[in-house]
Amino acid sequence: MKFWSIQTIKAWEKAQVNGYLVGSPEHYMIPEKYSWMIEQMQKRLKNYDGSPPPIWVWTKKPDLRQTCHVNTGINSRIRC
């Protein structure tokens, strides 16, 4: 299954070295959205304490014309 994710350049470069993405609060582009997602995961997933941190992904390429996915001034990449 393919997933799409928008990542900072720093997170993407780290993924290239590791071969996979790792959730990390230092890479969150919109921290309040991740806080919401962690709260939802804690409600729905037994024993989930916020670790490992989530990675926001889509199953279809997000339409970047419709919604602001990245804060202004943040250099980012979208990859599948």
Image: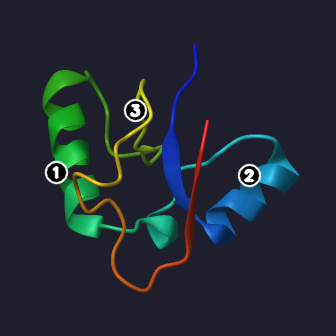
Is 32 situated above or below 66?
Answer: below
Q: Amino acid at mark 2?
A: Ala
Secondary structure found at label 1: helix
Query: Residue 78 in the image: x percent, y percent?
Result: 55, 51
Position of 73 with respect to 47 (left or right) is: right
Query: Residue 1 in the image: x percent, y percent?
Result: 58, 13
What residue is pinned by disc 3? 58
* Quadrant in the rendering for residue 28: bottom left
Query: Residue 14 in the image: x percent, y percent?
Result: 75, 60
Q: Residue furthest bottom?
A: 73
Q: Earlier in the sequence, mark 1 or mark 3?
A: 1
What residue is pinned by disc 1? 36
Q: Amino acid at mark 1?
A: Trp
Secondary structure found at label 2: helix
What residue is pinned by disc 2? 15
- Relative depth, front residue between 48 and 63: 63
Q: Amino acid at mark 3?
A: Trp
Q: Badge 1 local density, few (<14 within 10 Å), some, or many (20+)?
A: few
Residue drawn at 30 percent across, 55 percent down: 65
